[in-house]
Image (spheres, helix red, strand yellow):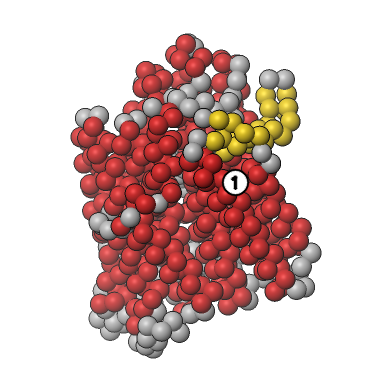
């Protein structure tokens, strides 16, 4: 690959960062504030897209930001893996920005200026993570992402939100300390922290004990945001945030920064061969398998829709981690592709949950009997995304999970393959009742949800969304008013983004080979194997 010095990687970060003061200065002019949000999103997307042709042809774009300490530089570098993450984030931020406008306006949310400013800052940090050229640069933006997303988690300013925010900081900063410590160990062992396709050459010759220590620190640190059990509990509690934030946390930025960091460690710091020789891939695969099964079982008993989606995220992220730890080419492709597939599907689901909340103030699945009559387009999009999450053919999740299944079989991982199949059945078990309740039941004929009762998920605390208290618990409401299929069920600021990301889930499932995402993933595989 040819490295070219360019300011475009830096400009991509600065365009959303520059929107922050512009948004803050527009407090009294909501239309201007939201215009800045949309312009920044479109500008960032355009800049990221402009990098695609060059990267696909073998060009790597680099921006040197200066020397941090002797031997360690802050450098931005656009390679295929980084561009994959940045392109995904910029596409979905554009859609999420439109959705946020509709959501925040319809609920007349407080502190909207702070919300949009923090949203923009979060995406700058995310792009910085994507384009980081070494562990130090990655660590800096990784911590900036924690800081910039904190105001979004505590947006409601309730006692529950503040408690969730403190837990979020404790977990994520703790993970950051582990990442920093692991980075220091890597530098001590090899004299560099630069990402190298196939792994840093010198790390293959270090003392295996220290190599395993470094890997464990980095895997645990990134595993916090990847929500690997038992480091996951911050994620369900963070559902106290407004729904667009939940989508940002689950689909675009925070959790994906965790699995992206793990991908960098496995593919560009240690390399697949060294991970295998050190024997550290199998323990991670076991933890990931346990997480994807246990979280799926816990999701079965969640009646609150956002909380069920939260545990679904915990499970689905471990599909990605499993693919990276299995180390076969097909598994790596499946894991990286699931970053994209899960993002589109999960964002669709959270967008649907938010629209349901805004239009009907309904947050519990047991309250949604017959709601498909009131919100047919929204619930149809939810059904599409649910089918994809369960791995049904012709939807995005099927393609990535197929690669994962093939990859586990390639290395003789029969137990892992069986676990993937069991998890698929569990996905159907906790998503199908939502669809069935919405379209095939009425308030008079509804049966209780969730499927399982018991303490598997710990103490159940009804979630609050955007500061509105729903602690009175689920009740079955009256029959729903029919709104038809013409789009009158919600504002198009929300309905449009829902349909766009749902359509993306279908396109990724029907035409995966035609998407730029899979082309970038194949290029990643070519450089690291």
Q: Is residue 480 left or right of residue 55?
A: left
Seen at 69% across and 41% down, the residue is 7
* Along the line of sight, the residue nearer the viewer: 287 or 406: 406
Mark 1 surroundings within 10 Å by alpha-carbon count, few (fewer than 14), some (14 through 19), many (20 or more): many
Seen at 63% across and 65% down, the residue is 38
Residue 167 in view (yes/no): no
Q: Secondary structure at mark 1?
A: helix
- 15 vs 373: above or below: above
Quadrant of image for the C terminus: top left
Query: Picture quarter containing residue 281?
Result: top left
Question: Residue 171 in the image: x percent, y percent?
Answer: 55, 42
- 492 vs 11: above or below: below
- 34 vs 93: above or below: below
Seen at 41% across and 84% down, the residue is 486
Residue 193 in view (yes/no): yes
* Along the line of sight, the residue nearer the viewer: 144 or 50: 50
Residue where numbered disc 1 is placed? 127
Question: Residue 421 in the image: x percent, y percent?
Answer: 23, 47
């Amino acid at each position: 690959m040819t490295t070219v010095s360019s300011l475009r990687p830096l400009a991509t970060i600065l365009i959303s960062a520059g929107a922050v003061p512009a948004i803050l200065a527009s407090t009294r002019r909501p239309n201007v504030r939201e215009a800045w949000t949309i312009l920044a999103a479109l500008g960032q997307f355009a800049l990221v897209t402009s990098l695609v042709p060059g990267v696909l042809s073998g060009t790597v774009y680099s921006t040197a930001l200066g020397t941090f300490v002797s031997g360690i530089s802050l450098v931005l570098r656009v390679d295929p893996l980084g561009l994959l993450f940045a392109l995904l984030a910029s596409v979905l931020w554009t859609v999420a920005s439109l959705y946020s406008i509709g959501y925040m306006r319809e609920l007349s949310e407080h502190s909207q200026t702070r919300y949009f400013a923090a949203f923009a800052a979060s995406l700058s940090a995310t792009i910085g993570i994507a384009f980081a050229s070494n562990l130090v640069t990655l660590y800096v933006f990784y911590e900036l992402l924690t800081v910039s997303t904190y105001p979004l988690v505590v947006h409601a300013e309730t006692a529950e939100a503040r408690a969730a925010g403190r837990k979020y900081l404790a977990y994520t900063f703790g993970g950051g300390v582990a990442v920093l410590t692991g980075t220091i160990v890597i530098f001590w062992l090899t004299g560099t922290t630069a990402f190298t396709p196939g792994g840093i050459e010198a790390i293959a010759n270090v003392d295996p004990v220290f190599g395993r220590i470094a890997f464990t620190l980095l895997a645990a640190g990134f595993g916090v945001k990847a929500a690997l059990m038992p480091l996951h509990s911050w994620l369900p509690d963070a559902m106290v945030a407004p729904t667009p934030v939940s989508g940002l946390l689950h689909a675009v930025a925070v959790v994906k920064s965790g699995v992206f960091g793990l991908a960098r460690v496995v593919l560009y710091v240690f390399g697949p061969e060294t991970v295998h020789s050190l024997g550290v891939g199998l323990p991670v695969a076991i933890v990931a398998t346990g997480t994807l099964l246990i979280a799926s079982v816990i999701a079965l008993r969640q009646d609150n829709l956002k909380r069920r989606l939260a545990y679904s995220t915990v499970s689905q992220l471990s599909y990605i981690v499993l693919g990276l730890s299995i180390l076969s080419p097909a598994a790596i492709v499946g894991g990286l592709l699931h970053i994209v597939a899960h993002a589109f599907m999960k964002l669709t689901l959270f967008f649907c949950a938010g629209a349901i909340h805004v239009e009907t103030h309904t947050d519990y699945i047991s309250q949604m009997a017959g709601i498909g009559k009131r919100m047919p387009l929204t619930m149809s999009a939810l059904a599409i995304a649910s089918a994809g999450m369960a791995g049904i053919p012709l939807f995005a999740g099927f393609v990535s999970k197929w690669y994962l299944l093939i990859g586990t079989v390639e290395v003789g991982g029969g137990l892992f393959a069986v676990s993937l199949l069991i998890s698929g059945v569990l996905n159907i078990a906790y998503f199908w009742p939502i669809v069935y309740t919405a379209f095939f039941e009425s308030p008079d004929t509804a049966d209780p949800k969730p499927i399982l009762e018991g303490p598997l998920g710990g103490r159940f605390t009804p979630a609050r969304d955007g500061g509105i208290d729903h602690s009175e618990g689920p009740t079955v409401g009256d029959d729903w008013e029919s709104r038809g299929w013409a789009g009158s069920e919600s504002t198009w600021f929300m309905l449009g983004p829902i349909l766009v990301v749902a359509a993306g889930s279908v396109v990724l499932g029907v035409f995966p080979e035609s998407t730029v995402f899979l082309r970038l993933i194949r290029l990643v595989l070519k450089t690291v194997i």
